Image: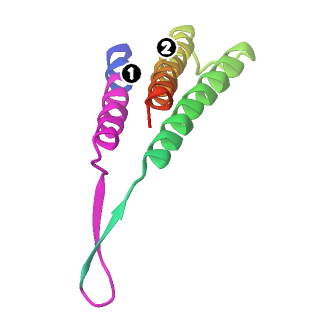
């Protein structure tokens, strides 16, 4: 069970990384859809949406870890300590990854602002 949780977190991080890299390279994830006339239209996901989804995902992981910790502290017999520790570690890793992304974005923004016009 522990290995599956780690693999799940790694998969989520890789997905977010690929989405951010695609947006940084000018490639937006595209979802084709059909409109009323049968013509394909393209829905583009913006960088802000990707970032918001990533922050929401980190927030959700932290909330789940908090719920498990509270349930364990209240004596819920279905929750064991390793489960709580894994959830807390997932929340910590997710937050650290998001912090690194934020730091890189701030650095990139500062570099762009320092460019001569």
Badge 2 marks a residue whose secondary structure is: helix
Q: In screen coordinates, is 28 left or right of 113?
A: left
CA separation in Å, label 1 and label 2: 8 Å
Is label 1 in a helix, a strand or a loop?
helix
Give coordinates of residue 106: x percent, y percent: 52, 25
Query: Looking at this view, is 31 or 74 the one in front?
Result: 31
Pointer 2 local density, CA inside 10 Å: few below 14, some 14–19, many at least 20: some
- Horizontal side of 73 relative to 77 (left or right) equals right
Pinpoint residue 13: horizontal percent, then vertical percent: 37, 27
| Residue holding disc 1 | 5
Q: Which residue sits at x=51%, y=12%? A: 89
Q: Position of residue 83 (x, y in %)?
A: 51, 15
On screen, residue 25 above or below 43: above
Is residue 34 within the magenta segment?
yes
Q: Residue at x 39, y 54 (%)?
A: 45
Q: Which residues are magenta?
A: 10-38
Name the residue at the front extreme.
117
Height in image: 10 above or below 84?
below
- Dot 1 and dot 2 residues touching (CB under 8 Å): yes
Q: Is residue 107 magenta?
A: no
Q: Give the labeled residue for mark 2.
A: 86
Question: Residue 99 at what x, y percent from top left?
Answer: 53, 20
């Amino acid at each position: 069970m522990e290995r599956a949780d780690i693999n799940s977190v790694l998969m989520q991080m890789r997905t977010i990384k690929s989405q951010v890299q695609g947006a940084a390279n000018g490639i937006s994830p595209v979802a084709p859809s059909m409109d009323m006339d049968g013509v394909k239209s393209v829905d583009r996901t913006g960088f802000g949406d990707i970032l918001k989804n990533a922050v929401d995902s980190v927030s959700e992981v932290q909330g789940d870890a908090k719920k498990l910790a509270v349930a364990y502290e209240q004596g819920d017999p279905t929750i064991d300590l390793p489960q709580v520790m894994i959830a807390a570690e997932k929340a910590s890793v997710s937050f650290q990854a998001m912090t690194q992304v934020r730091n890189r974005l701030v650095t990139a923004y500062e570099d762009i602002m320092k460019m001569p016009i």
